[in-house]
Structure formats: C-alpha cells, structure tokens
C-alpha cells in the first residue's frame, strides 16, 4: 500500500475512490487534475491506498465496487459490505475525520436502509450512476443530471465537488432526494425499466 501523506496536495479537494473498475475509472477521469485522488482497489496492488488511510484524508469517499447479480437475481453485496464495515470502523477510530461516503455502486434500497441502521455515525449519500457500458467515461464527462440522496448538508458537499471541481462539461442539474434509500430506489427502478 502507498503511504498517503506523501502524495496529498491540500490545495485541491482530496477524494477517495474505492473500486478501480468501470465506475471508479469514470470517476477518476471526472476529477483528474481537479482533485487529489486516492484510489483503493486490490487490483492495483502496491498502487492501492488502504481503506482506513482514506478516512482521515478525504472530504468524500466514493464507493464504486461491483455488486453483480447472484444466480437467484439478488445483488452480491459481500465486497460492498466489507468495504463499508472497514470504513465505518475507521470512522469510529478517528472521530475528527468525517468524510461523506458517496455510494455509486448499485445497491438495493433495503441494503441502504440496513446500512443506515447498522452505522448511524457515517455520513452517507447515494448518487446512482447512469452510465452506458459502452461509453462510461464519455457519459460521466457529459453528465447532465446529478442525483443525490441523503441529508442536505452531505448532498451539498458532493454536489459542490461535482460542480466546482470536476471535468464535467456543460450544464448539470442536481436533484436532491429526501434520503439515501430514495436514491437507491431510483437506480433500481431504472434498471428494472431498462431490463
């Protein structure tokens, strides 16, 4: 794992991205050059930053881990659950650090509800992504609608990051839903419609 403190440039917002797959890469491109990025994913080997290192350094930590469908159709949340548990534990150890955890992974609404009950101390925003598999980076950079669900203060942190510190071009409308569960439901509603 890379030592974080040596690479952080505090003149830019510091964000964490957990997951270096399709969505994580699109996020990286969206903030490249505009934010200091710390990326955590085992696939990166020595270039990966540990999850607990992200907590004291980042304003926002994006969770973009895979949640593939299991044979029965349910989402496989084991990686997501492990990531959240580790970040939540790190948040308990460092009460001075309180980054917003912004979930970009497709997570069922009931799992978001359980997460909120299990970890009431975390600042949680769900921001569903609407990226096409064939062009995720182009879709992210041309995003016209940012959907956020969570409390107003935490949603404002994420919205400001996208509006003030991203490479997204053009006019982007922000829709803030009343809670994280509603945003997760919106993503699942769209997935069901497009299936």
Image (cartoon, rainbow, N blue to C red):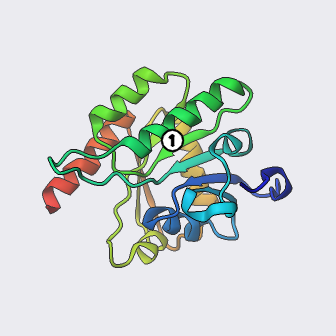
Q: Position of residue 32 (x, y in %)?
A: 64, 70
Residue at 23% across / 48% down in the picture? 188
| Extreme residue toward the right, this view | 6
Residue 161 is drawn in which quadrant?
A: bottom right
Q: Secondary structure at mark 1?
A: helix
Query: Horizontal and vertical percent for residue 91?
Result: 64, 29
Residue receiving disc 1: 83
Q: Residue at x 41, y 66 (%)?
A: 144
Q: Quadrant of the C terminus?
A: bottom left
Q: Position of residue 128 (x, y in %)?
A: 37, 52
Residues 6 and 28: in front is 6
Res 132 visible: yes
x and y percentages locating residue 16 in the rendered image: 63, 52
Q: Quadrant of the N terminus?
A: bottom right
Residue 35 visible from this viewpoint: no
- The residue most toward the front is 45
Q: How many marks?
A: 1
Q: Is residue 103 left or right of residue 15?
A: left
Image vertical order of residue 90 relative to residue 143, above or below:
above
Q: Is 64 placed above or below 144 here?
A: above
- Name the side, left or right, on which 111 lies relative to 84: left
Other residues around mark 1 within 10 Å, as few (<14) / some (14–19) / many (≥20): some
Residue at point 38%, 42% (across, down): 78
- In the displayed structure image, the side of residue 46 where residue 125 appears, left or right: left
Q: Name the residue rendered at 24%, 52% in the picture.
A: 69
Vertical side of 137 occupied by 123: above or below:
above
Q: Nearer the viewer, residue 21 or 102?
A: 21
Which of 69/64 is in front?
A: 69
């Amino acid at each position: 794992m890379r030592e974080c403190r040596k690479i952080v440039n505090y003149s830019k917002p510091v964000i964490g991205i957990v997951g270096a797959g399709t969505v994580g890469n699109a996020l990286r491109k969206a903030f490249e050059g505009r934010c200091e990025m710390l990326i955590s994913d085992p696939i990166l080997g020595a270039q990966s930053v540990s999850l607990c290192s992200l907590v004291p350094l980042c304003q926002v930590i994006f969770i973009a881990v895979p949640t593939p469908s299991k044979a029965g159709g349910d989402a496989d949340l084991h990686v997501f659950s492990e990531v959240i548990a580790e970040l939540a534990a790190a948040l308990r150890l460092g009460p001075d650090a309180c980054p917003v955890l912004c979930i970009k992974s497709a997570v069922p609404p009931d799992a978001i509800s359980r997460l909120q009950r299990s970890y009431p101390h975390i600042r949680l925003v769900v921001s569903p992504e609407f990226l096409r598999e064939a062009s995720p980076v182009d879709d992210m950079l041309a995003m016209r609608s940012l959907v956020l669900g969570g409390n107003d203060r935490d949603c404002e942190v994420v919205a400001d990051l996208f509006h003030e510190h991203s490479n997204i071009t053009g006019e982007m409308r922000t829709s803030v839903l009343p809670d994280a569960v509603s945003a997760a439901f919106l993503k699942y509603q769209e997935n069901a419609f497009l299936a």
